[in-house]
Amino acid sequence: MEIVEDIVIVGAGIAGLTTSVGLHRLRIRSLVLESSDRLRITGFALSTWNNAWKALDAIGIGESLRHQHHLTPSILFASTNLDQPVSEISYKGHEVRCLQRRLLLETLANELPSDTIRFSSKVVSIEESGFFKRVHLSDGTILKTKVLIGCDGVNSVVAKWLGFKAPVFTGRLAIRGYTKFNDGHGLGPKFRQFVGKGLRFGFLPCNDEDFHWFLTWTPSTKDEELEDDPVKLKQFVMSKLEDIPNEMKSVVEKTQLDAIFSSPLKYRRPWELLWGNISKGNVCVAGDALHPMTPELGQGGCAALEDGVVLARCIAEALLKPGGEETNGKIVDEEEEYRRIEIGLKIFAQKRRWRSIDLISTAYMVGYIQQNNGTIINFLRDNFLSKFLPGMLLRKGDFDCRKLKY
């Protein structure tokens, strides 16, 4: 069975849903394919900076999410090698919050018409069909589309079709957890981060009840067996908390086993984006399919939100006439429409290429510095670099994707 769609978005994650909501705001329909049978909540929370909230405001859901997440006043950076905190950086003048991923995805999905997301729809292949792309699904369905957008994550089928190599393992792993305090955690709204001895811990309150935490480290061979066993994961984290304040230890202690998971940290080599095809004809990638990065800047989800707004605007410029009338085959011939779509996606690629390279490269270097256990790097980090790294987080989060309407 072959179904014709104007725009097909592969992946109902942050980038895919943001793009779809942006298009919906501009009165352009899209179909979102999700391989799972429901929204997938990979990770419990994400740091959101000015750039994320500008994107959320652009698609009209910022206010509802603000009411459910505290504004973070500052971040406390400490070294487990020193007795006193290294630095505390104020976020005054910046909007920083720890946003629950589940609430973000559900809010995005609820903004869409009920028939927008097609679950249990795994893409197995893509082929050319004149000015269209034919997308083959595992259930035998074939979708014929004018525009194909890959927001299908780190293991993107669309990115592979465009010629990108699989993201590279950094050699580091992350354990993430989420703790619910029904009576309130009483720990205040500050972010806390501890680095040293090859480890990086983070503790991020979302509101009075919900707390997100993480640990990143370079594993030894024996650590590999931890990945799928939450009991061992929790025991491992607790064994590494000896230099962490007791109030933070209690956050991990109270975490339920079904709220802990581990994952390898991967990234796309920045130079691949220099000459790689972010777009090709009427196909492009966004989100983690475009710029998988390590988590040190807290910009992975934020950049996906930026992508969604910029991409929706670029597609709208290609498909809508100046007066807001949608083009179709009756008004513009297929070749002309294809050309406009191709130009629109090239503009998106131009706008996102250097931003993606910057974030990937900076995150990787920050991670290297923070988790390096060498004597010289430790000294430089704890005594000098730690004073500059917090400010870098704020600068990278000051990007403005602009309003949705063009």
Image: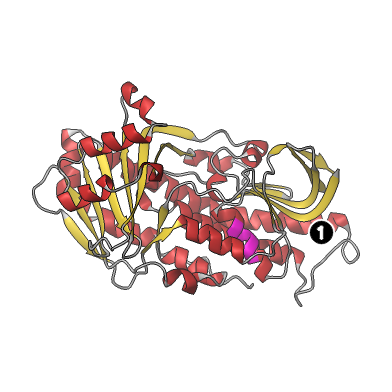
Q: Is residue 317 above or below residue 362?
A: below
44 left or right of 212 in image: right
Residue 130 in sight in this render = no
Question: Colour scheme in the image?
Answer: secondary structure
Between 118 and 58, the one nearer to me in the picture: 118
Q: Give SS at disc 1.
A: helix
Q: Which quadrant would residue 374 be assigned to in this image?
A: top left
Residue 21 drawn in magenta: yes
At x 34% / y 22%, what residue is drawn? 221
Q: Position of residue 269 (x, y in %)?
A: 48, 38
Type of amino acid at the residue the image marks with label 1: Glu
At x 27% / y 68%, what residue is drawn? 73
- The N terminus sits in image quarter: top right
How many numbered discs sit on the rendered protein? Answer: 1
- Most distant residue in the front direction: 183
Q: Position of residue 211 (x, y in %)?
A: 32, 56
Between 251 and 320, the one nearer to me in the picture: 251
- Most distant residue in the top direction: 221
- Residue identifier under label 1: 337
At x 72% / y 70%, what residue is drawn? 27
- The C terminus sits in image quarter: bottom right
Q: Position of residue 74 (x, y in %)?
A: 26, 64
Q: Position of residue 216 (x, y in %)?
A: 32, 40
**Magenta span: chief secondary structure:** helix
Q: Residues within 10 Å of mark 1 (few under 14, many from 20)?
A: some
* Image: magenta residue range: 17-22
Q: Which quadrant would residue 368 be assigned to in this image?
A: top left
Residue 237 drawn in magenta: no
- Most distant residue in the left direction: 83
At x 28% / y 71%, what residue is drawn? 92
Residue 323 in sight in this render = yes
Q: Which quadrant would residue 85 be assigned to in this image?
A: bottom left
